[in-house]
Amino acid sequence: MPTILFSLLILGRFHYSSLAHDNTALSSTTTGINLPTPASASAASPVVGPATLTGQQVISKFNKGPEDADTVLILLALWRIPSKQADLTLCVNFPLKKAGEEAEASGEYATRVFEEAVSSLKVEDLGLFAGGQ
């Protein structure tokens, strides 16, 4: 696996874990990881990616106890900007199952919206990012 793809994999997992930490997730699983093709993942590219991660987190919010935790679909995309030593992430959190409710929502609509956002995102001005050389 080329170095830049390996970096995207590691950075994607880092950002996903960081989100789980920030959400105070009771549990966190990754159900899918997609990396860009090696041909499109050149470190010389101004923006590399996206790598996408899909998973679920069990999250208890608003001072609720663990018994009132919700199951949330997490969709995360990561682009690396090598010249700025920066990452750009796009994340969608979609509740699949609310505590105390029998019905579970389909994440199909959230996934479609996420995929459209990922495919249409373009960085027009690298000056928005500090850092780098």
Image: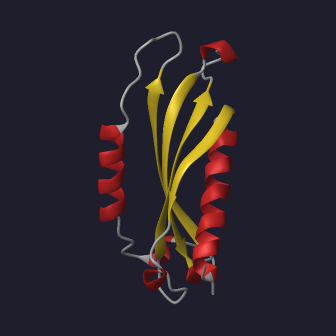
| Residue shown at 63% from the left, 55% from the top | 15
Total numbered labels:
0
Side (left or right) of 15 relative to 106: right
Question: Where is residue 13 drawn, in percent x and y?
Answer: 64, 57
Between residues 59 and 63, which one lies in front from this camera angle?
Answer: 59
| Residue shown at 62% from the left, 42% from the top | 29
Question: Where is residue 23 drawn, in percent x and y?
Answer: 63, 35
| Residue shown at 36% from the left, 75% from the top | 124
Q: Is residue 127 above or below residue 44?
A: above
In the rendered view, how is the structure colored? Answer: secondary structure
Quarter of the picture containing the N terminus is bottom right
Query: Furthest-bottom residue in view?
Result: 44
Side (left or right) of 94 relative to 17: left
Q: Is residue 25 above or below residue 85?
A: above
Question: Where is residue 113 drawn, in percent x and y?
Answer: 31, 47
Query: Furthest-top residue in view?
Result: 100
Question: Where is residue 87 drawn, in percent x and y?
Answer: 57, 67
Between residues 53 and 31, which one lies in front from this camera angle?
Answer: 31
Q: Is residue 123 above or below residue 104?
A: below
Side (left or right) of 121 relative to 91: left
The picture quadrant where one finds residue 83 is bottom right
